[in-house]
Image (cartoon, rainbow, N blue to C red):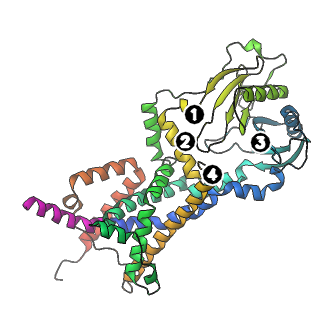
Amino acid sequence: MGTVDTVEARGGALRPVLWRLHFFTGFLAAPVIVWLCVSGIAFAWHSQLESAIYDRALTAVADGRHAPLSQQLAVVTAAYPDHDVVKVTPATGAGQTTGILVTPRGARPAGLEPATGALTVYVDPAIPAITGRIHEARRPSEWLRNLHSNFRLGTGAGTLTELAASLAVVSLATGVYLWWPRTVSALGRSLVPRVRNLRRGRRRAWRDLHSAVGVVSLAALALLLVTGLTWTEYAGRWIDLTKRALIPEAPALATTLTDTTQEPAGHGEHRTRNGAAAPTLRTGDLDRVAAVAAGAGLTLPFAVTPPPAPGQAWSVTEIDDRWPIRRESIAVDPGAGAVVDRLAFSDNPLLEQATTIGIGFHEGTLFGLPNRIGLTVLALAVMVVVLSGYVMWWRRRPAGAFAAPPKAGPLLRTVPVPLLGGFGVLLILLPTLGVAFLGYLLAERMLRRGAPAAGR
């Protein structure tokens, strides 16, 4: 009995600690989380926005059989003679244009950012003629991705979104503990908020709405936070370390040709700005490579990439990332008209596959329209949770007071050792959270020392 009493007393002492932690993590993260929700909804629908903004460039109006890809490419290289061809994405059907990505000669991408001056030129495949172009830096997906991750203020601002997501993880975990019902009947009641009482201004109704919507959306929101954190500057490094530890040498498409003398005559080279040799593009090879890809079973949409250097094969990669993901890639020797290497999505390690699937879910592409609708509903649900949390705080707040939950006792004496250890691991995995929590503990200690003694 003594042990049970101790456990219950310890659990009772733990609740105020977690309540205060839940309040501050949620209160501080909420503004950024709302921003991530709004920008995330916009990003989920970026392909529709792109179609509306660039309808003229993306729509082919001419009827008839498509001209060979080499002729379509020749139109673009004639219009942009000082640009390198990076990728060709053939039209997938009627009304679709062929996209040809080009960059100023010698320009290279910086990390995930497109190369300076990169643009995709679109060609009506039946004429063929240029219908328009999109500068990659201004493409809706790229623009909204930066808006979502760093407010378009640069990579340094991404630390703020990483911290907000890390704080949200703690807010979710502590919220589940505070919500956890003691009986099955209480569980059923807790999942049905008393919405009709909201009009009466009752704080309990707002609390029910806050907890019910939060719990129902918990799993999807946790998955969204985790997948989002894999891209961050600091927490994302653990993913990279794990991959390097578990996958010493990830499979890669082999594009080096064993016999470079098989290259067609006249396949010379020029020098890029950094002095590296790059092959002079033979537009006729494009038709041969696309035909080999179709014969090898690759299906549109796919992207054809010219060789980056002499002695390298062309590569063709499927770009449909909807479930079930295939995304096969092949390396093609245009001189021999043969596939020299092949890489399927299933050839990747499970961790790499899981990361790709998680990214597809996070971006709203994995399941197509249902995925985008689901993410939109989830983002709206999170905004409801944030709004109801602020309303609860405002209604219980005495005039002129901040009304945070009261300061708890010493953390090390209150929190069970396993929970404390788990939280310590979380602080290591989420470095920005670790720094913020150390600051929180320091502030709590200073406030406790500065508080007036009892009885004064």
Q: How far apart are marks 4 and 3 (CA)?
A: 17 Å
Relative height, residue 360 to residue 388 (above, below): above
**Tag 3's secondary structure?**
loop
Relative height, residue 182 to residue 221 (above, below): below
Q: Where is residue 444 in the image (x, y as percent from the top left)?
A: 29, 66
**Tag 4's secondary structure?**
loop
**Tag 2's secondary structure?**
helix
Q: Give the quarter of the figure containing the C terminus.
A: bottom left
Q: Give the range drawn in magenta.
A: 1-20
The numbered mark, 4 or 3, whose residue comes first in the sequence reads 3
Query: What crowding class fits label 2: few (fewer than 14 Cα within 10 Å), some (14-19), or many (20 or more)?
Result: some
Q: In which quarter of the image is residue 200?
A: bottom left
Regarding residue 152, the answer to whether it shows in the image is no
Q: Where is residue 449 in the image (x, y as percent from the top left)?
A: 24, 70
Residue where numbered disc 1 is placed = 345
Q: Is residue 12 shown in magenta?
A: yes
Relative side of 251 to 108, left or right: left
Q: Residue at x 89, y 41 (%)?
A: 126
Secondary structure character of the magenta stretch overall: helix
Relative side of 342 to 337, left or right: left
Residue where numbered disc 2 is placed = 356
Query: What crowding class fits label 1: few (fewer than 14 Cα within 10 Å), some (14-19), or many (20 or more)?
Result: some
User: Which kind of residue does numbered mark 3 sit on?
Assistant: Thr
Q: Is residue 405 shown in magenta?
A: no
Indicate which disc residue 368 carries.
4
